[in-house]
Image: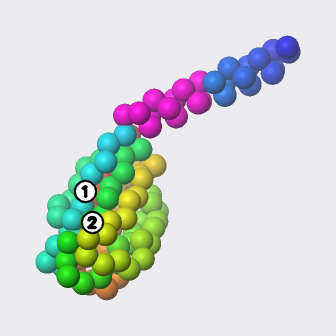
Amino acid sequence: MSNTKRNAVISLAFTMIAVNVTAVHADEYKAVQKDKTFKPASLKVKVGDTVDFLNEDDFFHNVFSLSDIKSFDLGSYPKGQGRKVTFDKPGIVEVECSIHPEMQMKIEVTP
């Protein structure tokens, strides 16, 4: 095997190990939607962590973010349902509800 191929194989192996180590240490958090607010209003997570946005109100919510760090739209969903987002870059993510504009949350994603 040539040195170039050997180096590529070694590089790929280290990348796969790094990805697996990150996944093993990832945590999951809950952000509850209750009384037209996010609880907690702010959250600190690490890269690779997941947040479950659980609706505990008697009406629909539509959680979204237009942040450069993590852009998502979870669509409308009723009481008792949750939708999950995994954060893959460090920075501040501003989260809102498109149905209830007063609902706002900040998630700080650390390396």
Residue pictured at 29% horizontal, 82% vertical: 60
- Give the side of residue 83 with respect to residue 16, left or right: left
Q: Quadrant of residue 37?
A: bottom left
Taking 72 as reference, is 30 above or below it?
above
- Identify which residue is drawn at 41% across, 52% down: 87
Q: Position of residue 11 (x, y in %)?
A: 66, 25
Q: Give percent across and percent down for residue 98.
A: 35, 82
Q: CA distance from mark 1 to mark 2?
A: 7 Å
Q: Residue at x 37, y 34 (%)?
A: 25
74 lies above or below 40 = below
Whole-percent x, y for residue 2 in the image: 85, 15
Tell me the SS state at disc 1. Answer: strand
Residue bounds of the magenta highlight? 14-25
Q: Is residue 18 magenta?
A: yes
Residue receiving disc 2: 54
Locate the C terminus and report the quarter of the image it occupies.
top left
Q: Is residue 33 visible?
A: yes
Amino acid at dot 2 = Leu
Quadrant (top left, top right, bottom left, bottom right) of the N terminus: top right
**Among the 4 quarters of the image, the one containing residue 69:** bottom left
Give amino acid for label 1: Lys
Q: Secondary structure at mark 2?
A: strand
The answer to whether mark 1 and mark 2 are in CB contact below 8 A is yes
Disc nearer the start of the sequence (1/2): 1
Quarter of the rendering containing residue 12: top right
Q: Nearer the viewer, residue 101 or 99?
A: 99
Residue for point 37% across, 65% down: 83
Report the residue marked by disc 1: 30
Label 1 neighbourhood size at 10 Å, few (<14), some (14-19), many (20+)? some
Is residue 104 in sight in this rendering? no
Left or right of 34 on screen, residue 105 = right
